Amino acid sequence: MNKINIHEAKTHLSRLVDQVAKAGKPMVMVVPLDQERKPVSRRGFMAGQFTVPDDFDTMFADEIAAMFEGEE
């Protein structure tokens, strides 16, 4: 994200908007710095939708070792 001062924004607004415009979709948001958007945390967004087996860290360990050792 580029931050510019108000003088540059007033002087070059059309050029700045043209640089980010994409097929009529909104691409520019002007907000005061103290109201700047923070990224949304996605931690836990799938909570309760699946479970991890207790042996997850050792699953298929024997099969994987056999592949590296050339055994079947």
Image (cartoon, grey):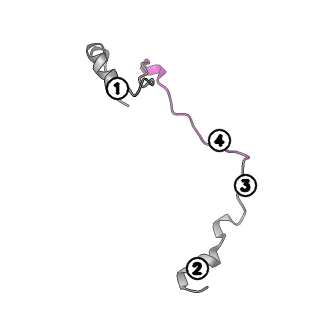
Residues packed near mark 3 inside 10 Å, few (<14), some (14 to 19) or many (20 plus): few
Q: CA distance from mark 3 to mark 2?
A: 25 Å
Q: Quadrant of residue 53?
A: bottom right
Residues packed near mark 1 inside 10 Å, few (<14), some (14 to 19) or many (20 plus): few
Kind of residue sitting beneath label 2: Ala
The segment highlighted magenta reads 31-48
Kind of residue sitting beneath label 4: Phe
Q: Which residue is mark 3?
A: 51
Q: Secondary structure at mark 2?
A: helix
Tell me: 35 left or right of 53.
left
Q: Earlier in the sequence, mark 3 or mark 1?
A: 1
Q: Which residue is mark 1?
A: 3
Q: CA distance from mark 3 to mark 1?
A: 43 Å
Q: Secondary structure at mark 4?
A: loop
Q: Which residue is mark 4?
A: 45
Q: Is residue 27 magenta?
A: no
Contact between labelled residues 2 and 1, with CB atoms less than 8 Å apart: no
Q: Which mark is residue 65?
A: 2
Residue 22 placed where, x, y %?
Answer: 39, 28
Kind of residue sitting beneath label 3: Thr
Kind of residue sitting beneath label 1: Lys
Q: CA distance from mark 1 to mark 4?
A: 30 Å
Above or below — where is 69 with respect to 56?
A: below
